[in-house]
Image (cartoon, helix red, strand yellow):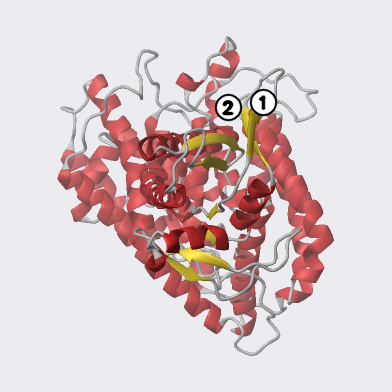
Amino acid sequence: AAFGSQVFHLLETIFNAYDKIAERRRIFKVETVGDCYVAVCGLPTPNKDHALAMCRFAWECMLAMGKLMGKLEVELGPDTTELNMRIGIHSGSVTAGVIRGQKARFQLFGDTMNKASRIESTGMAGRVHLSQETAQLLIARGKKHWVTEREDKVKMKGLTEQTTYWLNAKGEGSSGSGDGSQSSWGYTNSHRSSSTKSLLTDAENNMKQMRPRLVEWNAKVLSLTLQKIVALRTLDEVGANVDEERLREIESEAEFGKFTAPAGDITFQTVPKDFSFHSELPELGSDLSTQLQSFVHEVANACSINFFHNFEHASHMVLSVTKSLRFMDPSAYTGNNDDKLFTYLNDPLTHFVLLLAALIRDLKHPGINNEELKKEGNPLNLKYNGSNTIERNALDAAWDILKQDEYVDLRRAIYHTEQEFELFRELLVRSVLATDVSDKELQNQTVERWEEAFGKPDGNHEAPLNENQRKTALVEHIMQVTTNVHAMQHWHIYHRWSGALFNENAKAYEDLRIDQSPTEFWFKQELDYFDSYVLPLARRLKGSLVFEAMGEELAEHAWSNRCEWEEKGEGTIGS
């Protein structure tokens, strides 16, 4: 799911590219309606080869979109490259004109337009769908090899069953599966013997295909923030004050999983007011870039093959952090409210740690929650004294990778002094622990800190201005949003990830690791999850100074998903 500004940027980028192709191909752009681009060939200037020109235009647009999605991936997220388009082309006579009045514009009317719309809507992602009329024009121009008759007849609203065609022109084989199906996700009936085994195999195969792209994307996101850390350090001129021997000693003795972070507010780095993160940033160098890429690759390999808690989910969380941090950028704020500007998280180390915390949160996840680990008597539970077991194990797993000698340059880029290391560790530990929903004491402390810093959602409390308290509360809440963002996005995203978590529980039941099949408790558990956790979290964000627009959108999706789950949930489980 994307916020309105991201959708705008996405469509503007795509449509601008199509405009340039249209101008070169002498195609006339009629209008855009939402995410639909309407174009015509043969008017206002007649063109006897209008069908050929339009098909060439269609394939160029298809190829251009594939290239653009790769460029937009870092900014909009790894799932951007999964976006696809479908194109429908029909040929016939139209009525064209301008309806006079306010905001007058050139428009097309008639049955040809209606059928063109039906051809588009009954097509498939990644393909160009042709009406029989258009296909016949191509064949008449000696382009029979361009078309393949569609196997099934197509039912179209207001029309009889239609024979249609696929375009086989150059450019065929563009990215996209065609149907966009995800066979490894959804709700499986966990009463069936071995019902999750084949699905988990599918999930593992999908992850093997996705992993290289996700590794590259995560490394790019971390790299951009790391560049900002280096830029700020250069400005402070502390690069020469590195005590390498002391840092090595600290690293060799450092605890992460068993580290007890201070309970109070975090003391954040101070960023000079005149420092701009949008100025030219220093290059990291090939050695450091290689180390970062290798580190992310090791993290990916250390993620368990689960339905939900896996590397794809970790990447989904990293994307959520990047979206949240856009609201923490002081340069994006043009208002006059100093109180709001004071609240922004503007130091790059905090940004980097939040991204890293999201990336490692699911490392070596055991496939069951902390409460079930206790019942199981899992050795991990004993290692961490039954406190935030999954989260602390992930922290240790991440540090075991990062502290290797081959990543020394990466570590020095993240922190250069003993003080920076201590802040890095405190931020990372507290960010990861904030995601443990089962730790009621910790969650209550998080809510109390938020209400002290920002006031209660009902507005009955005037919060004092405390910079570190507010920033600490923001760090905790960004991580809580990140871990639960699937429930605060569009229904299809919630449904997909909820189904994945259901399947993870179904496998645990089949493996005799939990006592109940999720078919027995999932419907009520999800309602409780919305009512006791997701909706209160969304309301706090909605009423805050910083998350205004984002919080409102998340709250609306959370409530909509809760209502739809109440209506459809029981019928979905086990179907």
> Which of the two discs, 1 and 2, labels the residue nearer the N terminus?
1
Q: Is residue 45 above or below residue 66?
A: above
Looking at the image, which is closer to me, 60 or 397?
A: 60
- SS type, badge 1: helix
In the image, what residue type sits under mark 2? Arg
Q: Can residue 369 be seen in this view?
A: yes
- SS type, badge 2: helix
Query: Which residue ends up furthest to the bottom in the rendered image?
Result: 193
In the image, what residue type sits under mark 1? Phe
Query: Which residue ends up furthest to the right in the rendered image?
Result: 567
Looking at the image, which is closer to me, 209 or 449?
A: 209
Q: In this view, does 62 lie above or below 449?
A: below
Using the numbered discs, state the Cα–Cα distance from disc 1 to disc 2 in whole angstroms: 7 Å
Residue 294 spot, x, y in % from top left: 26, 56
Q: Mark 2 points at which residue?
A: 470
Q: Name the residue under label 1.
A: 454
Q: Is residue 31 above or below residue 313?
A: above
The crowding category of the residue bearing disc 2, from other C-alpha atoms within 10 Å (few below 14, some 14 to 19, many at least 20), is many
Mark 1–mark 2 contact, CB under 8 Å?
yes
Q: Is residue 424 above or below residue 510?
A: above
Horizontal side of residue 327 vs 568, given as left or right: left
